[in-house]
Structures are given as structure tokens and as C-alpha cells.
Image: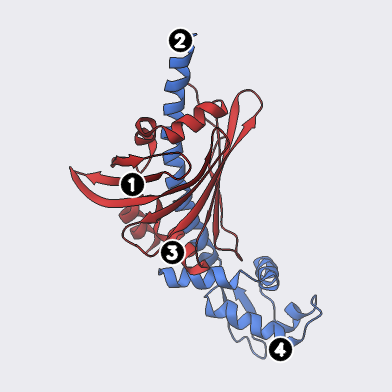
Chain colours: A red, B blue
């Protein structure tokens, strides 16, 4: 088991552009990270929040493919997410759309780049672009865009 | 705490002059005149920026005798940071699971060779 200290996710929200940029480094070679991102059996193991099972219904991680998955709670589908794989370049780059079916008119365009680092490590950058600053701020405020509801109520209480 | 306020805070901070003003007020309260000094802009222009900042709740103005110094509401700034931090933690949680998946994959590949 490897320890992963010092690999904290960084998030930046440009004050003037409707974007969210997520950067994270991984202790694995780029091809391995890419495979964990594109093989549906592996994706199912990490996508979505803790304690919520993500049921991958379709995951065609190739250019022109599509995906759809649901968040399951107690055997019930509580939220759905879908999009298209606009462009997939092995080991290097994925461009995909993303929609949370609770906000069917909302769509984000996500570009995922996989950068090789020394010592078989990989940096992943996810740049999401949405239609307006308001939509971006709502995504940041809700966390719903990535189907993550864990800890929501507790934090709402904390934040008043 | 509403998403509306978050949007207003982000919008208020979208302007470089307003970000400067916020940075200046983080050091201590200042009057409109004091805030206008470093900029090649009119008092009116600075007042306009201040209206956006007060509208977002980031800055408040209280009367102190003749003066009405501007005050940074640090909690509001903190609030925005907290929203982003919550989103960040959610992403981090996902990526920790991805770390574990990658560990498994690396071990399996190691066995093979």
C-alpha cells in the first residue's frame, strides 16, 4: 500500500471565466491512470461519492462514444449523469460533455489531460467549462455536478 | 447562506481593482479617499466599485464621526473559501479511491512481470 501524502487536490475557479480547474497527481504511470479512467469496471470503483454506489450503465470511452451512470442508494437510483466522449486520445487526453439529469439544460465541457511526471507519476488536470459564471458558482456551491452529496447536510448546518 | 450570495461574491471579485481593494482592506479599515489614492481613477469610480463590494456583503461601511471607513467582512470571504473547500474535499475523496484502484492495478501488473 502506498501512502499518498502531499497529493492533495487543488481546485481553482477563475473569477472572470466560467471554469473549474482540478489538478491532482497520482503515484502511477500515465497509461495506468488513463486505464482507470476509461475501463468501466475500474471507473465504477472510484467514481461518485463515498457510500454511494455508482451503477455504470454505458461507458464507451472512445471518440464519439457516450456514457451514462446512476447514483444508487439502498438499491434505488437517486441521480443520473450522462454525456458524450467528444475526443479520446489514448493515455493523453479526454474531452467529454457532462450533464446531471437534475439540471437537464446544464452541460459542462470537460477536458482531462494526463501529464507524465518523473518516477512513473502522473498529473491529471480536469478543466470544466460551463455556460455562465452563475452556473459555475452554483456547481461549486452544490457539489451536485459530480454527484457528490456526502457530508452535504452536515456542512450546511456548519455553514448556517 | 445562499447560492445567490456566492454568485455576488464571485462577481464582486471578478474585477482586479476590487480584488486590490479587498486586499487593501484585509490589512485594515480605510476611507474611500484612502482607497482611491493608489489608483489613477476618480473617487467616483472607487465608490462605484465599493457599491459592488458592499452589495455582495464583502465590505461594510460604518459611520465614525465624520468618517465612514470601509471594513472587510472577513467571514464572507471565508464563506466563499469554504464552498470551494467543500467541493475540493469531494473531489479529493474520489481521487483517494482512484489512488487505491491504481495501487491494485500496479500490484497486479507487478505480479504479471
Label 1: how many Cα within 10 Å (few below 14, some 14–19, many 20+): some
The residue mark sitting in front, 2 or 3, is: 2
Question: Which numbered dot is residue B44?
Answer: 4
Residue extending farthest front: A64
The residue mark sitting in front, 1 or 3, is: 1
Q: Can residue B73 be seen at all in this image of the molecule?
A: no
Q: Residue at x 60, y 83 (%)?
A: B51
**What separation in Å lies between label 2 and label 4 (alpha carbons)?**
72 Å
**What separation in Å lies between label 4 and label 3 (alpha carbons)?**
32 Å
The residue mark sitting in front, 4 or 1, is: 1
Q: Which comes sooner in the sequence, label 1 or label 3?
A: 1
Q: Residue at x 24, y 51 (%)?
A: A78
Q: Tell me the SS state at disc 2.
A: helix
Label 4: how many Cα within 10 Å (few below 14, some 14–19, many 20+): few
CB under 8 Å between discs 4 and 3: no
The residue mark sitting in front, 2 or 1, is: 1
Residue A53 horizontal/vertical position (percent): 28, 40
The residue that label 2 is drawn on is B112
Most foreground residue, A62 or A145 = A62
**What separation in Å lies between label 2 and label 1 (alpha carbons)?**
32 Å
Residue B1 horizontal/vertical position (percent): 40, 68
Q: Can residue A156 be seen at all in this image of the molecule?
A: yes
Question: Which numbered dot is residue A68?
Answer: 1
Q: Quadrant of residue B38?
A: bottom right
The residue that label 3 is drawn on is A138
Q: How many discs mark residues in the rendered view? A: 4
Amino acid at each position: 500500500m502506498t501512502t499518498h501524502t502531499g497529493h492533495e487536490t487543488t481546485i481553482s475557479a477563475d473569477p472572470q471565466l466560467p471554469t473549474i480547474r482540478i489538478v491532482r497527481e497520482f503515484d502511477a504511470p500515465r497509461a495506468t491512470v488513463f486505464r482507470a479512467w476509461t475501463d468501466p469496471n475500474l471507473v465504477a470503483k472510484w467514481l461518485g461519492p463515498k457510500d454511494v454506489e455508482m451503477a455504470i450503465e454505458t461507458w464507451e470511452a472512445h471518440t464519439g462514444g457516450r456514457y451514462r451512470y446512476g447514483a444508487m442508494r439502498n438499491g434505488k437510483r437517486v441521480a443520473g449523469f450522462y454525456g458524450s466522449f467528444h475526443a479520446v486520445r489514448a493515455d493523453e487526453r479526454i474531452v467529454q460533455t457532462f450533464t446531471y439529469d437534475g439540471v437537464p439544460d446544464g452541460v459542462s465541457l470537460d477536458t482531462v489531460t494526463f501529464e507524465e511526471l518523473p518516477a512513473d507519476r502522473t498529473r491529471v488536470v480536469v478543466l470544466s467549462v460551463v455556460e455562465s459564471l452563475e452556473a459555475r458558482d452554483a456547481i461549486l456551491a452544490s457539489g451536485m455536478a459530480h454527484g457528490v452529496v456526502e457530508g452535504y447536510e452536515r456542512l450546511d448546518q456548519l455553514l448556517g | 447562506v445562499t447560492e445567490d450570495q456566492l454568485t455576488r461574491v464571485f462577481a464582486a471579485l471578478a474585477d482586479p481593482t476590487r480584488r486590490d481593494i479587498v486586499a487593501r482592506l484585509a490589512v485594515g479599515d480605510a476611507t474611500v479617499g484612502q482607497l482611491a489614492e493608489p489608483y489613477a481613477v476618480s473617487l467616483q469610480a472607487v465608490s462605484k466599485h465599493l457599491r459592488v463590494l458592499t452589495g455582495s456583503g464583502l465590505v461594510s461601511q460604518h459611520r465614525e464621526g465624520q468618517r465612514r471607513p470601509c471594513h472587510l467582512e472577513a467571514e464572507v470571504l471565508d464563506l466563499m473559501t469554504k464552498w470551494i473547500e467543500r467541493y475540493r474535499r469531494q473531489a479529493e475523496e474520489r481521487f483517494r479511491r482512484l489512488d487505491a484502484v491504481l495501487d491494485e492495478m500496479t500490484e497486479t501488473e507487478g505480479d504479471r512481470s
